[in-house]
């Protein structure tokens, strides 16, 4: 929540975790849009979501290691499936902030 704080937002950590758990439980049977994109060989919205947070983290000099890790994992998986042909995973991880 360091990035959010730097952006002028203040959250109660326990309330956020409670909300995340609740949403996860309610949507546990759903197939996420990112997984659907990967299964269809399309690009995900990871750049718009985690990439945005990563950019803000770098701007504010706030570590965002979890976001960077998730971003890299999704980009690697995306690279394996885009348009049904394997791509070089290293080039897919070229993060543009």
Image (spheres, grey):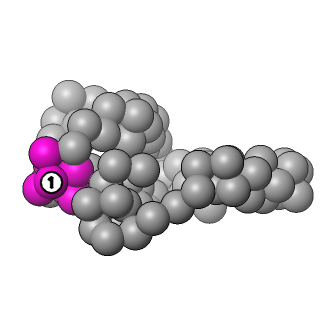
Q: Position of residue 20 (x, y in %)?
A: 70, 53
Q: Taking 57 as reference, is 46 left or right?
A: right
Q: Name the residue rendered at 75%, 51% in the picture.
A: 18
Look at the picture and state if 50 lies above or below 65: below
Would you say residue 56 sits in the magenta stretch?
yes
Inspect this view and state whether residue 75 appears: no
Closer to the camera in the image, 74 or 66:
66
Q: Position of residue 50 (x, y in %)?
A: 37, 53
Closer to the camera in the image, 47 or 15:
15
Closer to the camera in the image, 68 or 72:
68
Query: For residue 5, what is the image quadrant?
Result: bottom left
Sort mark 1 into few (<14), some (14-19) or many (20+) by Cα contacts within 10 Å: few
Q: Main secondary structure of the magenta part?
A: helix
Provide the residue span drawn in magenta. 55-61
Q: Name the residue rendered at 31%, 55% in the picture.
A: 3
Closer to the camera in the image, 48 or 16:
16
């Amino acid at each position: 929540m360091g990035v959010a704080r730097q952006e002028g937002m203040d959250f109660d950590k326990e309330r956020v975790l409670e909300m995340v758990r609740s949403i996860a439980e309610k949507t546990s049977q759903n197939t996420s849009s990112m997984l659907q994109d990967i299964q269809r060989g399309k690009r995900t919205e990871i750049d718009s979501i985690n990439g945005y947070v990563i950019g803000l983290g770098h701007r504010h000099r706030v570590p965002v290691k979890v976001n960077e890790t998730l971003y890299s994992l999704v980009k690697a998986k995306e690279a394996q499936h885009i348009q049904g042909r394997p791509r070089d995973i290293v080039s897919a991880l070229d993060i543009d902030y």
